[in-house]
Amino acid sequence: MESDNKNKYDMLVQLLSEGDAMVCLDARHPEVDVPNTHKDNPALSLVFNLNFRRPFDVQETGIFATLAFGGKPHKCVIPFEAVWAIHEPESKKGQVWEGSFPKDLKLQVGANVKEASLEPEPPLMNVKISSKISKKGQSTRSKKDRSHLRVIK
């Protein structure tokens, strides 16, 4: 599992250097710290970008960030053990780690091996977050204020 965590870290850092990175996680994992309203979500999706206003820290063990949920800040802890997919939201370039995938969700892989679609049994909630990671090479994307959460249906 330690090598999976390193792969997840590397994938996240690579996608952040290119722009947005969507992190899909099982918020029910015991070490995940998110607001209680999201704690029972096996398919919580959070989008990170280097241009977000609030700082966040990506380490080889996980992601540590103060995020705003409903306008209220929450110190979130997202260990990589709870992360089951990381991808770029528009192109879907990324990876799913089957060993970390929640057993109560169904993973469907299309005819094209590069494309995978997720069909959750419980409802899927996507949350757009805002934050900023402190790194020397900042992304060249626009510096829009994205310091809010929004539910994407």
Image: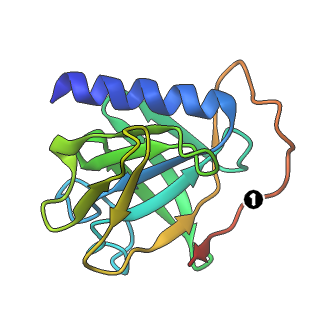
- In the picture, the quarter occupied by the C terminus is bottom right
The answer to whether residue 4 is above or below residue 124 is above
Q: Image point 35% across, 49% down: which residue?
A: 78
The image shows residue 149 at horizontal and vertical percentages of 62, 70
| Count of numbered circles in the view | 1
Colour scheme of the rendered structure:
rainbow
Viewer-proximal residue, 112 or 10?
Answer: 112
Q: Secondary structure at mark 1?
A: loop
In this rendering, would 79 be left or right of 148?
left
Q: Quadrant of residue 102?
A: bottom left
Quadrant including the N terminus? top left
Instruction: Point out residue 112 in the picture as x, y percentages from the top left corner.
Output: 41, 42
Residue 84 coordinates in the image, percent (x, y): 30, 47
Q: Which residue is mark 1?
A: 146
Residue 66 in the figure: left or right of residue 98: right
Q: Which three-letter amino acid code belongs to the residue tagged 1?
A: Arg
Q: Residue at x 45, y 29 (%)?
A: 11
User: Splitting the image into 4 quarters, where does residue 113 fall?
Assistant: top left
In the foreground, 17 or 113 = 113
